[in-house]
Image (tube, helix red, strand yellow):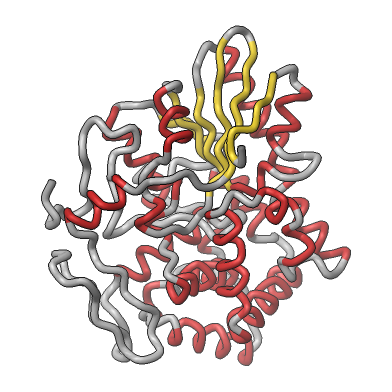
Amino acid sequence: MSPTQPETAATAGDPLPGRVPIASRWRAVWLVAALAASAAVHAASSPPAASAAPAAPSTAASASAPTVEGCPPVVPVPSAAELARARREASDHGVLWRITKQGHSSYLFGTLHVGKLAWAFAGPRLSQALKATDTLALELDVTDPALFAAPPAAAVAPLELPRPLRERLARQTERACVPSQALQHLNPLMQAVTLTVLSARHEGLDARFAQEIVLADAARAQGRPIVALEDVQSQMAVLLPSDAGEARRLLEQSLQQLERGRARVLLRRLADAWDASRLDELESYAAWCECAASAEDRRFLQRLNDDRNAPMAERVDRLHAQGKRVLVAVGALHMTGEHGLPRLMAARGYRVERLLPP
C-alpha cells in the first residue's frame, strides 16, 4: 500500500477497504446537504486564497500539514502506517439495525456526513453487516461523477441578497480560507451550507472521511452495486426552498450560527454522540440543535428529515423484496423518532433487531 497514491489507499480483502478519499469528493452537512459537502471538498481542494494555508502535500511523510493562523487545519494525507493503525484499531460507531423478512436480512446503518481517519474502517458489527450484504444503498451515490458533471438547477440558482447579507457571506468564505471563485457559482444558501461543512475542520472533522464516501469507494472497488434511495433534485428541493424569502431566512440563520461559532459546536456534539453510539442523544436532536425554536423551524426540520423517510423505506422494501441483501447507509437522524427507518420497516412487517448500540 503506497502512501503516495493520488486518490485512495486501498487494501484488498478488508471488510471495508481503506479507500480513504484524500483529494476531491465530499459529503453532506449533518442532516441533508449531500451536494453541499461535495461542493465543500472541491472548494477546499481549490487553490487557496491569499491568506489561506498552502495545500496539503501529496505525500503523508509529515505528521502535520502547514496552516495559517485563523485557517482551519489542513488534514494531511494518511501515511501507510497511519492507515494500518486505523485498520487495526477499528471499532464500531453510529447506530445499526438488522431487518429480516422473507427469509433474509438487510441492515440499516446510521452514518455521519463528516468524519476522521479513526472512523474510516469498519468495526466488528459493521464488518459483519458488510459481509452479510451484497448491495449498498445510500441517499445519493456521492462517488458518481454524473452528480457533479451537471449540478441540479436549484444548486446554482441565483438568489438576490441585500448588500449586508452578501458581505456577511463573503466574510465567512474568507474566514474558511476558501477562494471566493470556488463557491460563487452556487446558490448563496448552498454556499452557507458548504461553509458549515467546512467549519467542522476546526473540530478535527473532515467530510473526506464521511461514512458514505468510504463505503461507496469500497463498494466500487469491490464491484458491489450502489443504489441511490433519493434523487438529487428532491434533496435540493428540500434544502433550497423555492420561496426567496424563506431561502434568505435560512441563509440568515446559517450565517448567525457560523458567526457565533455555533455551527462547529453543534457538529462536534452530533459527532460525539454518533462516535459513542448514543442513540438517546441523537433521538433528542431537536431539543439541542438550536434549529427547532419556532413552528416554522420545526416544519422545515420535518421536511428535511422525517418526510424523506417514508419514500426511502419504500425503496428499501422493494430492494429487499427482490432478494437483495442491502446495507442501507443514510444519515443517523433518519433512524430516529417515530418516523425513523427502523420503525417504518417494522411497520412493513420486518423483524427489527438493534445491533448498535447493543
**In the picture provided, is 90 more to the left or to the right than 23?**
right
Dividing the picture into quadrants, the one containing residue 169 is bottom right
Residue at x-position 50% and y-position 89%: 171
Residue at x-position 68% and y-position 79%: 252
Please tell me whether residue 223 is drawn above or below residue 243 in the rendered image.
above
**In the picture provided, is 308 more to the left or to the right than 184?**
right
**In the picture provided, is 60 more to the left or to the right than 335?**
left
Of residues 240 and 283, the one nearer the viewer is 283
Of residues 237 and 122, the one nearer the viewer is 122
Residue at x-position 60% and y-position 57%: 273
Please tell me whether residue 85 is drawn above or below residue 190 in the rendered image.
above
Of residues 283 and 166, the one nearer the viewer is 283
Residue at x-position 51% and y-position 47%: 93
Going by the picture, which residue comes out furthest to the right? 295
Please tell me whether residue 16 is drawn above or below residue 66 in the rendered image.
above
Tell me how many marks there are.
0
Percent position of residue 351, x then y = 69, 19
Percent position of residue 196, x then y = 54, 71
Specify the quadrant that holds the C terminus.
Answer: top right
Percent position of residue 25, x then y = 35, 55
Going by the picture, which residue comes out furthest to the top? 103
